[in-house]
Image: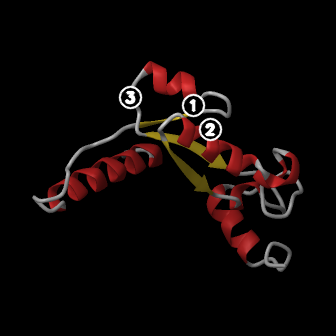
Amino acid sequence: MPRIGSIRRMRVVLTVLIACALAPATAHARLELGLGNSPGGAAAMRHAAPFGYRYQYLAGGVNTGRGWATWNPRGTFVTRYIDESVKAHITPVFTYYQITGSLPGTAEDGDRRAIVTNSPIPRR
């Protein structure tokens, strides 16, 4: 039986293939790649290869006081990341997934989603 990670990767590949197949013939069809990249690395990333996208995962929980909005003073992490990416001619991409870092508990991903979404704390 395939592992969950393998199934997710297959879904991504199939989604890309379907999107390419369904793209209008008149569209400027191309496939661009991106790379996960930490702050301060956009220029070096662009110099290494002509990547079109630069990826950052935003996490830390919605009710922990340690979420991405606390990574830089005044919540400027995303703004700085975007500015640096644009300067290097790379499109920034963010994944916003706060549930697994949220309180309460240390449940597995599926269990945590149920706990957090049924808890009044994150919705305040």
> Residue 42: which numbered mark, if any?
1
Q: Position of residue 107 (x, y in %)?
A: 74, 57
| Residue nearest the viewer, comparing 8 with 55 | 55
> Residue 50: which numbered mark, if any?
3
**Helix, strand or loop for disc 1:** helix
Q: Could you tell which of marks 1 and 2 lies nearer the N-terminus?
A: 1
| Residue nearest the viewer, comparing 43 with 15 | 43
Cα–Cα gap, marks 1 and 3: 11 Å
Q: Could you tell which of marks 3 and 2 lies nearer the N-terminus?
A: 3
Cβ–Cβ under 8 Å for marks 1 and 2: yes
Q: Is residue 57 left or right of residue 46?
A: right
Could you classify mark 3 by the number of other residues whose Cα lies within 10 Å: few (under 14), some (14-19), or many (20 or more)? few
Residue lying farthest to the left in this orientation: 25
- Residue pointed to by mark 2: 84
Task: Name the colour scheme.
Answer: secondary structure
Q: Position of residue 21 (x, y in %)?
A: 15, 56
Check disc 2 and give the amino acid type.
Glu
Q: Could you tell which of marks 1 and 3 lies nearer the N-terminus?
A: 1
**Helix, strand or loop for disc 3:** loop
**Helix, strand or loop for disc 2:** helix
Q: Residue at x 56, y 37 (%)?
A: 87
Q: Residue at x 57, y 51 (%)?
A: 94
| Residue nearest the viewer, comparing 119 with 79 | 79
Q: Is residue 54 above or below residue 17?
A: above
Residue lying farthest to the front in this orientation: 87
Check disc 3 and give the amino acid type.
Pro
Could you classify mark 1 by the number of other residues whose Cα lies within 10 Å: few (under 14), some (14-19), or many (20 or more)? many
Q: Residue at x 79, y 63 (%)?
A: 62
